[in-house]
């Protein structure tokens, strides 16, 4: 089990940038598959991006070319660099962790709000 704490959310104008961070506890961070999800008001939580222990990344089509997921295993921290933000990116962003590449996401952070104004 790993505890996750997100930070870096805020209010930004369309076209702007934000970098989210997710600090993880525990000694096995480098072995986890990590992910970012988001939930907009009135919508279900959706997948945004994931990075495997080996560094392979995947993105939802709507953020490809604009968002970059990365990790620093020495700092036990996951990042999401978000550029060219759009109003439709407004949501609560959550980081999540799981051991391995398949199966359910076992651990979740509390979320951080991202609001993009037009």
Image (tube, rainbow, N blue to C red):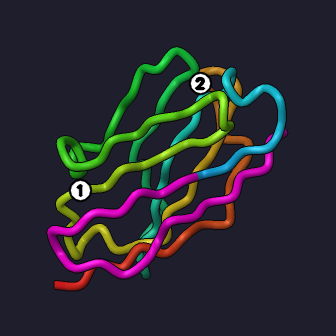
Read off the residue under disc 1: 83
Q: Which residue is at a point 17% across and 75% down the rendered structure image?
A: 14
49 vs 104, nearest the viewer? 49
Q: Position of residue 24 (x, y in %)?
A: 72, 45
Q: Which residue is at a point 80% across and 43% down the rendered structure image?
A: 25
Which mark is drawn over residue 29? Answer: none
The number of callouts visible is 2
- Residue depth check, mark 1 versus mark 2: number of the one nearer the observer: 1
Find residue 109 and report its image quarter.
Answer: bottom right
- 17 inside magenta stretch: yes
Q: Position of residue 28 (x, y in %)?
A: 78, 26
Find residue 18 and report its image quarter.
Answer: bottom left
Q: Is residue 103 left or right of residue 80?
A: right
Q: Position of residue 40 (x, y in %)?
A: 41, 73
Real-space Cα separation, disc 1 to disc 2, in angstroms: 29 Å
Segment colored magenta: 1-21
Read off the residue under disc 2: 102
> Mark 1 falls on what kind of element?
loop
Q: Which residue is at a point 83% across and 29% down the rendered structure image?
A: 27
72 vs 6, nearest the viewer? 72
- 110 inside magenta stretch: no
Outermost residue, front direction? Answer: 74
């Amino acid at each position: 089990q790993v505890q996750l704490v997100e930070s870096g959310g805020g209010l930004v104008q369309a076209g702007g940038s934000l970098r989210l961070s997710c600090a993880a506890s525990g000694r096995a961070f480098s072995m986890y598959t990590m992910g970012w999800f988001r939930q907009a008001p009135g919508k279900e939580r959706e997948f945004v991006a994931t990075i495997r222990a080996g560094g392979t990344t995947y993105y939802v089509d709507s953020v490809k070319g604009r968002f970059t997921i990365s990790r620093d295993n020495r700092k036990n921290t996951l990042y999401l660099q978000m550029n060219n933000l759009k109003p439709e990116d407004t949501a609560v962003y959550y980081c999540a962790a799981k051991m391995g590449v398949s199966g359910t996401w076992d651990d979740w952070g509390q979320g951080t709000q991202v609001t993009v104004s037009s």
